[in-house]
Amino acid sequence: GGGVVGGGMAGGGAAGVSVAESTRQLRAWAALDAQLHAQLASNQPGYRASVEQGRALVRVGGAWLRRAAADRRVCASLLAHGRPHGATTLGALCAMLGLPPEAAAEAVAYTTTRDVLSAAVRLNLIGPLAAVGMQAEVTETALAFARAAAARGVAHAASAAPLIEALHPCHDLLDRRIFRT
């Protein structure tokens, strides 16, 4: 086990992680976060949303993981980083909780599908009850993709939505914004 995603970062899964190990894991997290930062650097709306999500996750994680001083130190380090991205922060928090990579990937799959359907409801494209039904319909497929992604590992992580990535930066050009990002 061990590692930033899936084994017990700084005390969540394994008791008594040394300061040296905690430091190594934080460096590994920072390297992953830097890779994500480089990918999002040209997409300011996506970048801002990712950092806002990361900071919010650190605050929630810090409040939730009060049980161990090591967890509080890690959360403080993630927040001190200045721009913790949502995906890497979620991975770190899942690891601190001792969750396997599959559980972290499933959480991402669930929240992503929920967010897309929530946006469709806010845009009045579908009703709330239809969204519940659609979520149920896509859950198994989304979870299967999440498990496959977790099995491949973080080294193969990449974005797979080129059309969205091409259009997303244009959001800042709109006179009115429907969503924050």
Image (spheres, rainbow, N blue to C red):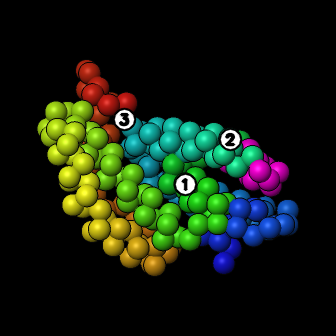
Residue visible at 82% across and 51% down? 69
Place residue 76 in its image quadrant.
Answer: top right
Left/right placement of residue 102 relative to residue 181 reads right
Q: Which residue is mark 2?
A: 63
- Mark 1 vs mark 3: in front: 1
Q: Earlier in the sequence, mark 2 or mark 3?
A: 2
Residue at the outermost left position: 125
Residue at the outermost top position: 175
Q: Earlier in the sequence, mark 1 or mark 3?
A: 1
Q: Quadrant of the N terminus?
A: bottom right
Asked if the residues shown at circle 1 and circle 3 are in contact, with their CB atoms under 8 angstroms apart, the answer is no
Q: Is residue 85 above or below residue 19?
A: above
Residue visible at 24% across and 61% down? 138
Q: Earlier in the sequence, mark 2 or mark 1?
A: 2
Please provide the residue range marked out in magenta.
Answer: 67-78
- Report x, y in % for residue 48: 46, 38
Q: Which residue is mark 1?
A: 90
Q: Is residue 27 above or below residue 81?
A: below
Left/right placement of residue 72 relative to residue 119 reads right
- Mark 2 vs mark 1: in front: 2
Residue visible at 49% across and 66% down? 103
Separation of marks 1 and 3 at Cα, in angstroms: 19 Å
Badge 2: residue crowd in 10 Å (few <14, some 14–19, many ≥20): few
Q: Which residue is mark 3?
A: 181
